[in-house]
Amino acid sequence: MRRSKNETRLDVAGLLAHGSLRGTAPLYLTPSSGLIEGVVLVSQLEAIRQVRPNTLVVLSSEMGSGGWLVSAALRQAWERKASAVVVAGSAYASAAVGLAERLGITLLATDGDPATLALALAAEIGAALSVVDVELARVARAVAKDTSLGDVLKTISKEMDGVGVSLEYDGVVLASAGMPSRETDEVITVEVDEPKSAVRFTLMARVPASGVHNLRLVHSILEVATPAVKAAWLLEDLFSSARAVPTAAIAGLDQDPQASGTEFEEKHRQLLNQLGWREGEPYVAVWFRSGQVQDHRPELTAVLRLLWRKVALRSPLAEVQGGWLTLVPAGDQDLSTQLETRIRTRLGPALAELGMVAGLSRWQEDAPALASIVREARLAAESARSTGPGTFLGFASLGVVAATTFVDMDAVALVAELTLPRLMTSPDRDVVITALASFLDHRGSVSLAAKSLNLHRNTLQARLNRARELGVPLDIPSELLSVHLIAKVLQRSMPDKTTSEDPVENQ
Protein backbone atom coordinates (compact mmCIF):
# COMPACT_ATOMS: atom_id res chain seq x y z
CA MET A 1 0.00 0.00 0.00
CA ARG A 2 2.95 2.23 0.50
CA ARG A 3 3.59 2.60 -3.24
CA SER A 4 0.09 2.01 -4.56
CA LYS A 5 -2.09 4.19 -2.38
CA ASN A 6 -2.88 6.60 -5.24
CA GLU A 7 -3.04 3.84 -7.85
CA THR A 8 -5.42 1.45 -6.07
CA ARG A 9 -7.61 3.71 -3.97
CA LEU A 10 -10.59 5.09 -5.88
CA ASP A 11 -12.81 7.66 -4.20
CA VAL A 12 -15.56 10.06 -5.19
CA ALA A 13 -13.41 13.18 -5.08
CA GLY A 14 -10.71 11.65 -7.26
CA LEU A 15 -13.12 10.38 -9.92
CA LEU A 16 -14.94 13.71 -9.98
CA ALA A 17 -11.64 15.47 -10.65
CA HIS A 18 -10.05 13.17 -13.21
CA GLY A 19 -12.12 10.02 -13.66
CA SER A 20 -15.34 8.67 -15.03
CA LEU A 21 -17.44 10.94 -12.78
CA ARG A 22 -16.12 14.14 -14.35
CA GLY A 23 -19.31 14.56 -16.40
CA THR A 24 -21.61 14.37 -13.37
CA ALA A 25 -22.97 17.29 -11.40
CA PRO A 26 -22.63 17.16 -7.58
CA LEU A 27 -26.01 17.76 -5.99
CA TYR A 28 -24.65 17.09 -2.51
CA LEU A 29 -21.13 16.11 -1.43
CA THR A 30 -20.31 14.73 1.99
CA PRO A 31 -17.40 16.41 3.85
CA SER A 32 -15.28 13.27 3.48
CA SER A 33 -14.83 11.62 0.11
CA GLY A 34 -16.37 8.14 -0.04
CA LEU A 35 -14.20 5.17 -1.00
CA ILE A 36 -15.31 3.34 -4.17
CA GLU A 37 -14.62 -0.40 -4.36
CA GLY A 38 -17.46 -1.38 -6.71
CA VAL A 39 -20.31 -0.10 -8.90
CA VAL A 40 -23.84 -1.39 -9.51
CA LEU A 41 -26.53 -0.28 -11.96
CA VAL A 42 -29.89 -0.52 -10.20
CA SER A 43 -33.17 -0.86 -12.05
CA GLN A 44 -35.19 -2.24 -9.12
CA LEU A 45 -35.27 -0.89 -5.60
CA GLU A 46 -34.86 -4.33 -4.00
CA ALA A 47 -31.44 -4.72 -5.65
CA ILE A 48 -29.94 -2.05 -3.40
CA ARG A 49 -30.46 -4.32 -0.39
CA GLN A 50 -27.72 -6.61 -1.77
CA VAL A 51 -25.20 -3.79 -2.28
CA ARG A 52 -21.86 -4.10 -0.44
CA PRO A 53 -20.37 -1.17 1.48
CA ASN A 54 -18.23 1.30 -0.52
CA THR A 55 -20.24 0.66 -3.69
CA LEU A 56 -21.33 3.49 -6.01
CA VAL A 57 -25.03 3.06 -6.83
CA VAL A 58 -26.14 4.24 -10.30
CA LEU A 59 -29.92 4.48 -10.72
CA SER A 60 -31.24 3.57 -14.14
CA SER A 61 -33.38 6.06 -16.08
CA GLU A 62 -36.49 4.05 -15.13
CA MET A 63 -35.70 4.41 -11.40
CA GLY A 64 -36.05 8.18 -11.78
CA SER A 65 -39.59 8.05 -13.05
CA GLY A 66 -40.91 8.83 -9.59
CA GLY A 67 -39.36 11.08 -6.97
CA TRP A 68 -40.26 8.68 -4.19
CA LEU A 69 -38.07 5.99 -5.81
CA VAL A 70 -35.03 8.25 -5.64
CA SER A 71 -35.75 9.01 -1.98
CA ALA A 72 -36.22 5.33 -1.19
CA ALA A 73 -33.01 4.47 -3.07
CA LEU A 74 -31.11 7.08 -1.07
CA ARG A 75 -32.31 5.58 2.20
CA GLN A 76 -31.44 2.02 1.14
CA ALA A 77 -28.01 3.09 -0.14
CA TRP A 78 -27.29 4.95 3.11
CA GLU A 79 -28.23 1.87 5.15
CA ARG A 80 -25.85 -0.25 3.04
CA LYS A 81 -23.03 2.33 3.48
CA ALA A 82 -22.80 3.00 -0.25
CA SER A 83 -20.19 5.46 -1.54
CA ALA A 84 -22.66 7.65 -3.46
CA VAL A 85 -25.82 7.59 -5.54
CA VAL A 86 -25.96 8.75 -9.18
CA VAL A 87 -29.29 9.73 -10.79
CA ALA A 88 -30.26 10.84 -14.28
CA GLY A 89 -30.15 14.61 -14.73
CA SER A 90 -33.92 15.02 -14.86
CA ALA A 91 -34.80 12.48 -12.18
CA TYR A 92 -34.30 14.40 -9.00
CA ALA A 93 -36.03 17.07 -7.00
CA SER A 94 -35.01 19.45 -4.26
CA ALA A 95 -36.57 17.06 -1.72
CA ALA A 96 -34.10 14.32 -2.74
CA VAL A 97 -31.17 16.70 -2.34
CA GLY A 98 -32.36 17.65 1.13
CA LEU A 99 -32.70 13.99 2.08
CA ALA A 100 -29.17 13.22 0.84
CA GLU A 101 -27.86 16.07 3.00
CA ARG A 102 -29.75 14.83 6.09
CA LEU A 103 -28.55 11.26 5.58
CA GLY A 104 -24.99 12.27 4.80
CA ILE A 105 -24.66 10.45 1.47
CA THR A 106 -23.24 11.93 -1.74
CA LEU A 107 -25.75 12.51 -4.55
CA LEU A 108 -24.63 13.09 -8.15
CA ALA A 109 -26.54 13.72 -11.40
CA THR A 110 -25.53 12.70 -14.91
CA ASP A 111 -26.85 14.10 -18.17
CA GLY A 112 -25.73 11.02 -20.07
CA ASP A 113 -26.96 7.45 -20.06
CA PRO A 114 -26.58 6.01 -16.51
CA ALA A 115 -25.74 2.58 -17.97
CA THR A 116 -22.84 4.06 -19.98
CA LEU A 117 -21.53 5.77 -16.86
CA ALA A 118 -21.75 2.51 -14.90
CA LEU A 119 -19.78 0.64 -17.58
CA ALA A 120 -17.08 3.31 -17.67
CA LEU A 121 -16.74 3.23 -13.90
CA ALA A 122 -16.61 -0.58 -13.87
CA ALA A 123 -13.73 -0.47 -16.35
CA GLU A 124 -11.90 2.03 -14.17
CA ILE A 125 -12.37 -0.15 -11.07
CA GLY A 126 -11.15 -3.18 -13.04
CA ALA A 127 -7.98 -1.33 -14.03
CA ALA A 128 -7.38 -0.41 -10.40
CA LEU A 129 -7.87 -4.05 -9.36
CA SER A 130 -5.24 -5.18 -11.85
CA VAL A 131 -2.83 -2.80 -10.14
CA VAL A 132 -3.88 -4.35 -6.82
CA ASP A 133 -2.99 -7.81 -8.11
CA VAL A 134 0.49 -6.63 -9.01
CA GLU A 135 0.79 -4.96 -5.61
CA LEU A 136 -0.30 -8.09 -3.74
CA ALA A 137 2.25 -10.18 -5.62
CA ARG A 138 4.95 -7.73 -4.56
CA VAL A 139 3.78 -7.88 -0.93
CA ALA A 140 3.84 -11.69 -1.02
CA ARG A 141 7.45 -11.63 -2.25
CA ALA A 142 8.42 -9.11 0.44
CA VAL A 143 7.06 -11.09 3.39
CA ALA A 144 8.43 -14.36 2.01
CA LYS A 145 11.96 -13.01 2.56
CA ASP A 146 11.45 -12.80 6.33
CA THR A 147 12.10 -15.82 8.53
CA SER A 148 11.07 -14.62 11.99
CA LEU A 149 7.49 -13.95 13.00
CA GLY A 150 8.34 -10.49 14.28
CA ASP A 151 9.97 -9.50 10.98
CA VAL A 152 7.00 -10.82 8.98
CA LEU A 153 4.55 -8.74 11.02
CA LYS A 154 6.77 -5.66 10.71
CA THR A 155 6.87 -6.06 6.92
CA ILE A 156 3.09 -6.44 6.72
CA SER A 157 2.62 -3.32 8.84
CA LYS A 158 5.14 -1.39 6.76
CA GLU A 159 3.31 -2.30 3.55
CA MET A 160 0.17 -0.75 5.06
CA ASP A 161 1.81 2.49 6.21
CA GLY A 162 2.35 1.37 9.80
CA VAL A 163 -1.12 -0.04 10.48
CA GLY A 164 -1.22 -2.14 13.66
CA VAL A 165 -0.89 -5.86 12.86
CA SER A 166 -1.07 -8.70 15.38
CA LEU A 167 -1.21 -12.47 15.63
CA GLU A 168 -3.81 -13.48 18.20
CA TYR A 169 -5.23 -16.58 19.87
CA ASP A 170 -8.61 -16.40 21.62
CA GLY A 171 -8.21 -12.64 21.98
CA VAL A 172 -4.67 -12.90 23.37
CA VAL A 173 -2.04 -10.94 21.41
CA LEU A 174 0.93 -13.23 20.80
CA ALA A 175 3.00 -10.90 18.61
CA SER A 176 2.40 -7.48 17.07
CA ALA A 177 3.89 -4.67 15.01
CA GLY A 178 2.87 -1.17 13.95
CA MET A 179 0.73 1.45 15.60
CA PRO A 180 -1.09 0.67 18.85
CA SER A 181 -4.79 -0.06 18.48
CA ARG A 182 -7.61 2.37 19.25
CA GLU A 183 -11.26 1.77 19.97
CA THR A 184 -12.31 3.54 16.76
CA ASP A 185 -10.16 1.35 14.48
CA GLU A 186 -11.68 -0.89 11.82
CA VAL A 187 -10.66 -4.49 12.58
CA ILE A 188 -9.82 -6.79 9.65
CA THR A 189 -9.22 -10.49 10.43
CA VAL A 190 -7.93 -13.52 8.55
CA GLU A 191 -7.59 -17.06 9.95
CA VAL A 192 -4.00 -18.28 9.72
CA ASP A 193 -4.58 -22.04 9.87
CA GLU A 194 -6.75 -24.64 8.20
CA PRO A 195 -10.30 -25.15 9.53
CA LYS A 196 -9.47 -28.61 10.97
CA SER A 197 -6.26 -27.49 12.66
CA ALA A 198 -6.05 -27.70 16.46
CA VAL A 199 -4.23 -24.37 16.60
CA ARG A 200 -6.49 -21.47 15.59
CA PHE A 201 -4.48 -18.28 15.20
CA THR A 202 -5.93 -15.08 13.76
CA LEU A 203 -4.01 -12.42 11.83
CA MET A 204 -5.52 -9.02 12.55
CA ALA A 205 -5.08 -5.50 11.22
CA ARG A 206 -6.51 -2.49 13.04
CA VAL A 207 -7.08 0.27 10.51
CA PRO A 208 -7.68 3.88 11.59
CA ALA A 209 -11.26 4.92 10.81
CA SER A 210 -10.02 7.97 8.88
CA GLY A 211 -10.88 6.40 5.51
CA VAL A 212 -7.30 6.58 4.22
CA HIS A 213 -6.95 2.83 3.64
CA ASN A 214 -8.80 0.55 1.27
CA LEU A 215 -10.22 -2.06 3.64
CA ARG A 216 -10.62 -4.63 0.89
CA LEU A 217 -6.95 -4.21 -0.01
CA VAL A 218 -5.98 -4.55 3.67
CA HIS A 219 -7.86 -7.86 3.82
CA SER A 220 -6.17 -9.04 0.61
CA ILE A 221 -2.73 -8.16 1.97
CA LEU A 222 -3.42 -10.17 5.13
CA GLU A 223 -4.53 -13.12 3.00
CA VAL A 224 -1.39 -13.15 0.82
CA ALA A 225 0.80 -12.72 3.92
CA THR A 226 -0.83 -15.58 5.83
CA PRO A 227 1.43 -18.35 4.41
CA ALA A 228 4.53 -16.37 5.44
CA VAL A 229 3.11 -15.83 8.93
CA LYS A 230 2.36 -19.52 9.31
CA ALA A 231 5.76 -20.58 7.96
CA ALA A 232 7.59 -18.20 10.33
CA TRP A 233 5.57 -19.41 13.30
CA LEU A 234 6.15 -23.09 12.45
CA LEU A 235 9.89 -22.48 12.00
CA GLU A 236 10.17 -20.68 15.33
CA ASP A 237 8.13 -23.38 17.07
CA LEU A 238 10.39 -26.06 15.59
CA PHE A 239 13.51 -24.29 16.86
CA SER A 240 11.87 -23.68 20.25
CA SER A 241 10.95 -27.37 20.56
CA ALA A 242 14.52 -28.42 19.78
CA ARG A 243 15.99 -25.93 22.27
CA ALA A 244 13.56 -27.06 24.96
CA VAL A 245 14.60 -30.74 24.87
CA PRO A 246 17.26 -30.42 27.62
CA THR A 247 14.81 -28.52 29.86
CA ALA A 248 12.18 -31.22 29.39
CA ALA A 249 14.77 -33.87 30.23
CA ILE A 250 15.71 -32.02 33.42
CA ALA A 251 12.07 -31.97 34.50
CA GLY A 252 11.88 -35.69 33.84
CA LEU A 253 14.72 -36.20 36.30
CA ASP A 254 12.88 -34.26 38.99
CA GLN A 255 12.18 -37.39 41.03
CA ASP A 256 15.63 -38.88 40.53
CA PRO A 257 16.97 -40.12 43.88
CA GLN A 258 20.07 -37.99 43.28
CA ALA A 259 18.14 -34.96 41.99
CA SER A 260 19.85 -32.58 44.39
CA GLY A 261 23.30 -31.28 45.12
CA THR A 262 26.63 -31.81 43.39
CA GLU A 263 25.98 -35.44 42.55
CA PHE A 264 23.08 -34.53 40.31
CA GLU A 265 25.08 -31.92 38.40
CA GLU A 266 28.01 -34.28 37.96
CA LYS A 267 25.80 -37.14 36.84
CA HIS A 268 23.99 -35.03 34.23
CA ARG A 269 26.79 -32.69 33.20
CA GLN A 270 26.34 -33.29 29.46
CA LEU A 271 22.63 -32.53 29.63
CA LEU A 272 23.26 -29.35 31.62
CA ASN A 273 25.86 -28.25 29.08
CA GLN A 274 23.26 -28.59 26.33
CA LEU A 275 20.95 -26.43 28.38
CA GLY A 276 23.68 -23.81 28.67
CA TRP A 277 23.84 -24.26 32.42
CA ARG A 278 26.68 -22.28 33.96
CA GLU A 279 28.07 -23.90 37.08
CA GLY A 280 27.76 -21.77 40.20
CA GLU A 281 25.37 -19.21 38.66
CA PRO A 282 21.99 -18.79 40.37
CA TYR A 283 18.93 -19.78 38.32
CA VAL A 284 15.21 -19.52 38.92
CA ALA A 285 12.52 -21.79 37.48
CA VAL A 286 9.11 -20.80 36.12
CA TRP A 287 6.34 -23.38 35.94
CA PHE A 288 3.10 -22.83 34.00
CA ARG A 289 0.07 -25.01 34.33
CA SER A 290 -3.59 -25.00 33.34
CA GLY A 291 -6.05 -23.82 35.94
CA GLN A 292 -8.01 -27.06 35.55
CA VAL A 293 -6.35 -30.44 35.89
CA GLN A 294 -7.96 -31.80 32.73
CA ASP A 295 -7.30 -28.69 30.62
CA HIS A 296 -4.11 -29.29 28.68
CA ARG A 297 -4.96 -28.37 25.10
CA PRO A 298 -2.12 -29.27 22.71
CA GLU A 299 -2.09 -25.83 21.09
CA LEU A 300 -1.23 -24.15 24.41
CA THR A 301 2.44 -25.08 24.00
CA ALA A 302 2.72 -23.07 20.79
CA VAL A 303 0.75 -20.20 22.32
CA LEU A 304 2.82 -20.11 25.52
CA ARG A 305 6.10 -20.15 23.61
CA LEU A 306 5.07 -17.09 21.64
CA LEU A 307 3.97 -15.33 24.82
CA TRP A 308 7.14 -16.34 26.70
CA ARG A 309 9.25 -14.58 24.05
CA LYS A 310 7.93 -11.30 25.48
CA VAL A 311 9.60 -12.15 28.80
CA ALA A 312 12.83 -14.10 28.21
CA LEU A 313 13.76 -14.78 24.60
CA ARG A 314 16.85 -16.87 25.38
CA SER A 315 15.29 -19.29 27.87
CA PRO A 316 13.40 -22.12 26.11
CA LEU A 317 10.01 -23.23 27.37
CA ALA A 318 9.46 -27.00 27.55
CA GLU A 319 6.22 -28.94 27.76
CA VAL A 320 6.60 -31.38 30.65
CA GLN A 321 4.36 -33.67 32.63
CA GLY A 322 1.89 -31.48 34.49
CA GLY A 323 2.68 -28.20 32.77
CA TRP A 324 5.43 -26.16 31.14
CA LEU A 325 8.89 -25.36 32.56
CA THR A 326 11.61 -22.85 31.81
CA LEU A 327 14.90 -22.10 33.61
CA VAL A 328 16.17 -18.52 33.65
CA PRO A 329 19.63 -17.26 34.73
CA ALA A 330 19.34 -14.78 37.61
CA GLY A 331 22.78 -13.59 38.64
CA ASP A 332 21.41 -11.37 41.41
CA GLN A 333 18.16 -10.84 43.25
CA ASP A 334 17.32 -7.71 41.22
CA LEU A 335 17.24 -9.80 38.05
CA SER A 336 14.88 -12.25 39.72
CA THR A 337 12.63 -9.40 40.83
CA GLN A 338 12.64 -7.91 37.32
CA LEU A 339 11.70 -11.30 35.88
CA GLU A 340 8.77 -11.57 38.29
CA THR A 341 7.60 -8.07 37.30
CA ARG A 342 7.83 -8.84 33.58
CA ILE A 343 5.81 -12.03 33.98
CA ARG A 344 3.08 -10.24 35.92
CA THR A 345 2.78 -7.27 33.55
CA ARG A 346 3.37 -8.95 30.20
CA LEU A 347 1.74 -12.32 30.77
CA GLY A 348 -0.75 -11.80 33.61
CA PRO A 349 -3.76 -10.79 31.45
CA ALA A 350 -2.93 -13.46 28.84
CA LEU A 351 -2.72 -16.19 31.50
CA ALA A 352 -6.11 -15.12 32.80
CA GLU A 353 -7.61 -15.31 29.29
CA LEU A 354 -6.11 -18.76 28.76
CA GLY A 355 -7.22 -20.04 32.18
CA MET A 356 -3.64 -20.62 33.34
CA VAL A 357 -1.46 -19.97 36.39
CA ALA A 358 2.29 -19.80 36.97
CA GLY A 359 4.80 -20.24 39.77
CA LEU A 360 8.34 -18.94 40.33
CA SER A 361 11.06 -20.49 42.47
CA ARG A 362 13.00 -18.52 45.08
CA TRP A 363 16.20 -16.67 44.27
CA GLN A 364 19.07 -17.85 46.47
CA GLU A 365 22.56 -16.42 46.48
CA ASP A 366 24.17 -19.83 46.94
CA ALA A 367 23.03 -21.50 43.73
CA PRO A 368 20.61 -24.23 44.88
CA ALA A 369 20.33 -27.63 43.30
CA LEU A 370 18.51 -27.54 39.99
CA ALA A 371 15.95 -30.10 41.11
CA SER A 372 15.04 -27.89 44.09
CA ILE A 373 14.13 -24.83 42.04
CA VAL A 374 12.08 -26.98 39.66
CA ARG A 375 10.13 -28.37 42.61
CA GLU A 376 9.61 -24.92 44.11
CA ALA A 377 8.25 -23.50 40.86
CA ARG A 378 5.92 -26.46 40.42
CA LEU A 379 4.60 -26.20 43.98
CA ALA A 380 4.08 -22.43 43.60
CA ALA A 381 2.07 -23.03 40.42
CA GLU A 382 0.02 -25.69 42.19
CA SER A 383 -0.69 -23.23 45.00
CA ALA A 384 -1.72 -20.56 42.47
CA ARG A 385 -4.56 -22.75 41.21
CA SER A 386 -6.58 -22.13 44.36
CA THR A 387 -6.57 -18.38 43.67
CA GLY A 388 -7.84 -18.63 40.09
CA PRO A 389 -6.72 -18.17 36.45
CA GLY A 390 -4.12 -15.51 35.82
CA THR A 391 -2.50 -15.95 39.25
CA PHE A 392 1.28 -15.82 39.41
CA LEU A 393 2.92 -16.80 42.71
CA GLY A 394 6.51 -16.75 43.84
CA PHE A 395 7.53 -19.54 46.20
CA ALA A 396 9.39 -16.96 48.29
CA SER A 397 6.10 -15.30 49.20
CA LEU A 398 4.51 -18.62 50.16
CA GLY A 399 6.99 -20.47 52.31
CA VAL A 400 5.33 -23.03 54.57
CA VAL A 401 1.90 -21.62 53.66
CA ALA A 402 2.15 -23.60 50.43
CA ALA A 403 1.48 -26.72 52.51
CA THR A 404 -2.17 -25.76 53.06
CA THR A 405 -2.76 -26.01 49.30
CA PHE A 406 -2.25 -29.75 49.17
CA VAL A 407 -4.05 -32.85 50.35
CA ASP A 408 -1.29 -35.10 49.04
CA MET A 409 1.05 -35.88 51.94
CA ASP A 410 4.03 -36.28 49.62
CA ALA A 411 3.50 -32.74 48.35
CA VAL A 412 3.30 -31.40 51.92
CA ALA A 413 6.50 -33.23 52.79
CA LEU A 414 8.15 -31.68 49.74
CA VAL A 415 7.09 -28.21 50.93
CA ALA A 416 8.72 -28.98 54.27
CA GLU A 417 11.91 -30.12 52.57
CA LEU A 418 12.11 -26.91 50.52
CA THR A 419 11.02 -24.37 53.13
CA LEU A 420 12.47 -25.87 56.30
CA PRO A 421 15.77 -27.42 55.16
CA ARG A 422 17.56 -27.00 58.52
CA LEU A 423 14.76 -28.73 60.38
CA MET A 424 14.63 -31.57 57.87
CA THR A 425 18.36 -32.26 58.10
CA SER A 426 18.70 -31.79 61.86
CA PRO A 427 19.67 -34.92 63.88
CA ASP A 428 16.92 -34.11 66.42
CA ARG A 429 14.26 -33.56 63.73
CA ASP A 430 11.80 -36.19 64.97
CA VAL A 431 11.92 -34.97 68.56
CA VAL A 432 11.34 -31.35 67.49
CA ILE A 433 8.51 -32.29 65.10
CA THR A 434 6.77 -34.30 67.82
CA ALA A 435 7.00 -31.32 70.17
CA LEU A 436 5.62 -28.99 67.47
CA ALA A 437 2.70 -31.26 66.65
CA SER A 438 1.66 -31.64 70.29
CA PHE A 439 2.06 -27.92 71.03
CA LEU A 440 -0.19 -27.00 68.09
CA ASP A 441 -2.62 -29.86 68.82
CA HIS A 442 -3.21 -28.22 72.22
CA ARG A 443 -3.74 -24.73 70.71
CA GLY A 444 -0.43 -23.35 71.90
CA SER A 445 -0.62 -24.54 75.50
CA VAL A 446 2.84 -25.58 76.68
CA SER A 447 1.49 -27.13 79.87
CA LEU A 448 -1.10 -29.35 78.16
CA ALA A 449 1.32 -30.36 75.41
CA ALA A 450 4.06 -31.26 77.93
CA LYS A 451 1.58 -33.34 79.94
CA SER A 452 0.42 -35.25 76.84
CA LEU A 453 4.06 -36.07 75.99
CA ASN A 454 4.96 -36.90 79.60
CA LEU A 455 7.59 -34.16 79.53
CA HIS A 456 8.53 -31.40 81.89
CA ARG A 457 7.26 -27.99 80.75
CA ASN A 458 10.82 -26.64 80.47
CA THR A 459 11.83 -29.57 78.26
CA LEU A 460 9.02 -28.86 75.82
CA GLN A 461 9.81 -25.14 75.83
CA ALA A 462 13.43 -25.93 74.99
CA ARG A 463 12.34 -28.05 72.03
CA LEU A 464 10.07 -25.29 70.76
CA ASN A 465 12.97 -22.83 70.98
CA ARG A 466 15.04 -25.35 69.07
CA ALA A 467 12.34 -25.38 66.37
CA ARG A 468 12.63 -21.61 66.08
CA GLU A 469 16.41 -21.91 65.70
CA LEU A 470 15.85 -24.35 62.83
CA GLY A 471 13.67 -21.83 60.97
CA VAL A 472 10.15 -22.87 61.98
CA PRO A 473 7.93 -19.71 62.00
CA LEU A 474 6.23 -20.42 65.33
CA ASP A 475 5.75 -16.73 66.08
CA ILE A 476 3.89 -15.84 62.88
CA PRO A 477 0.18 -16.53 63.49
CA SER A 478 -0.73 -16.62 59.78
CA GLU A 479 1.69 -19.51 59.23
CA LEU A 480 0.81 -21.69 62.22
CA LEU A 481 -1.84 -23.66 60.33
CA SER A 482 0.73 -24.58 57.68
CA VAL A 483 3.32 -25.50 60.32
CA HIS A 484 0.74 -27.67 62.07
CA LEU A 485 -0.11 -29.47 58.81
CA ILE A 486 3.55 -30.07 58.02
CA ALA A 487 4.25 -31.35 61.52
CA LYS A 488 1.35 -33.81 61.40
CA VAL A 489 2.35 -35.12 57.96
CA LEU A 490 5.99 -35.56 59.00
CA GLN A 491 4.97 -37.15 62.26
CA ARG A 492 3.01 -39.82 60.41
CA SER A 493 6.12 -40.77 58.46
CA MET A 494 8.20 -41.41 61.57
CA PRO A 495 9.12 -45.07 62.08
CA ASP A 496 8.42 -44.94 65.82
CA LYS A 497 5.74 -42.60 67.18
CA THR A 498 6.55 -43.35 70.85
CA THR A 499 7.48 -39.95 72.23
CA SER A 500 7.60 -40.30 76.03
CA GLU A 501 10.75 -38.94 77.59
CA ASP A 502 12.39 -38.76 81.01
CA PRO A 503 10.18 -36.33 82.97
CA VAL A 504 13.10 -34.91 84.93
CA GLU A 505 15.07 -33.90 81.83
CA ASN A 506 16.05 -30.22 81.82
CA GLN A 507 14.49 -29.57 85.19
Image: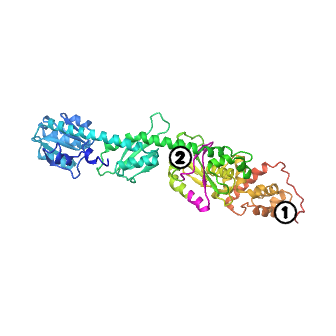
- Viewer-proximal residue among 418 and 271: 271
Crowding at mark 2 (Cα within 10 Å: few <14, some 14-19, many 20+): many
Question: Can you tell which mark lies on residue 72?
Answer: none
Counting residues from the start of the chain, the first of labels 2 and 1 encountered is 2
- Viewer-proximal residue among 334 and 474: 334
Residue 397 % position (x, y)? 63, 58
Q: Is residue 335 magenta?
A: yes
Residue 1 % position (x, y)? 32, 47
- Amino acid on which disc 1 is placed: Thr
* Depicted 279 relative to depicted 71: above or below: below
Residue 501 % position (x, y)? 88, 57
Q: Quadrant of the C terminus?
A: bottom right
Residue 399 % position (x, y)? 67, 57
Magenta range: 312-339
Q: Is residue 229 visible?
A: yes
Q: Which residue is mark 1?
A: 459
Query: Toward which corner of the image does residue 138 lie, by quadrant?
Result: top left
- Amino acid on which disc 2 is placed: Arg
Horizontal placement of 433 versus 125: left or right? right
Assign a secondary structure to mark 2.
Answer: helix
Horizontal placement of 452 versus 235: left or right? right
Q: Is residue 485 visible?
A: no
Assign a secondary structure to mark 1.
Answer: helix
- Viewer-proximal residue among 340 and 61: 340
Frontmost of labels 2 and 1 is: 2
Query: Toward which corner of the image does residue 45 lie, by quadrant?
Result: top left
Q: Which residue is mark 2?
A: 305
